[in-house]
Image: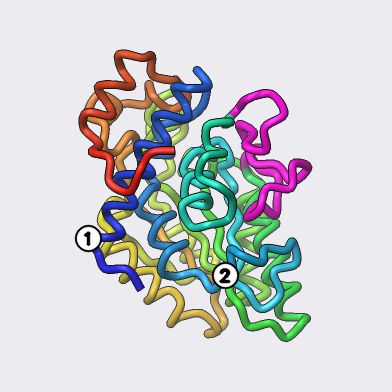
Amino acid sequence: MANLEELNKICTQVRRDIVRMVAGASSGHPGGSLGCVEYFVGLYFEVLKHNPDEFNMDGTNEDLFFLSNGHISPVWYSTLARRGYFPVSELASFRKLNSRLQGHPATKEKLPGIRMASGSLGQGLSAAIGAASAKKLNNDNSLVYCLMGDGEIQEGQVWEAAMYAGAKKIDSIIATIDYNGKQIDGETDDVMSLGNIKAKWEAFDWKVLEMDGNDMQSVLNVLSEAKSLSGNGQPIMIIMTTEMGQGVDYMMGTHKWHGNAPNEEQLQAALNQLTETIGDY
């Protein structure tokens, strides 16, 4: 088990990976990726029951993770590589021709750690609920995790899945919403206000927790609490407040870096704020 200092060093390195990957491809989504680093590092280095050395698609007796907002693939790829799923050096191939690290996660390339192609927003929660149901049928008590974006929950399929999980008491799923208040076209409040999302999920009979997604201790505490509450007849939703572009000052506080790549000068400015900690790829 890593301590907070070690986990935060990994977070800084993952942020370096993200900006270098996106800049190297001149394409990608740095904003949301940077905002979700603590969640991914906390999940993969401390919380998940998983085996990076023997990855298989079934995941029997392992916890599963599904990324619904697949455009933030850079943070997932970096975390998987840093956790040992595939060589860190492969991060340099992000979004390149014939790379296993496509812009949105895919299964055709057989990249270890990826069990579902994602990026068509609104679908991940349904898949995660299906996986959780299958585990129940197979008497597998492992948990299923899913991450969604806040703008993504404007999709209708999310609420069909929410209603199903609450009605069927799918209590081995721990879903999280990245609540940064921004999406590709602007502030979520301006595009389509989400209203009181805590009350909405509670109305669908989910147990709702809240956490600061850019504070590692908060992430670890709330994910631990979520695990302790699983198996009690309710699906669990975590509303995770984050800052889009966290760690890079000129990317924070705006939706402009949702899907824009930094140029060479901007990349260097970002790297100057993110000190290399465990080695660049």
Look at the magenta stretch and give its main secondary structure.
loop
Q: In the rendering, at what x and y percent does residue 45 appear?
A: 42, 64
- Left or right position of 190 against 201: left
Q: How far, Cα to Cα, is label 2 from label 1?
A: 23 Å
Q: In the rendering, at what x and y percent does residue 5 appear?
A: 22, 60
Q: Residues within 10 Å of mark 2 (few under 14, many from 20)?
A: some
Residue at 28% of width from left, 46% of height from top? 277
- Numbered tag placed on residue 50 in the rendering: 2
- Left or right position of 278 against 206: left
**Amino acid on which the number 2 mark rests in the picture:** His
- Left or right position of 28 against 186: right
Q: Quadrant of the C terminus?
A: top left
- The stretch of residues the image draws in magenta is 95-121
Q: Which residue is mark 1?
A: 5
In-front residue for pair 32/53: 53
Residue at 70% of width from left, 50% of height from top? 116
Q: Residues within 10 Å of mark 1 (few under 14, many from 20)?
A: few
Residue at 60% of width from left, 41% of height from top? 155
Q: Quadrant of the N terminus?
A: bottom left
Residue 172 in which image quadrant:
bottom right
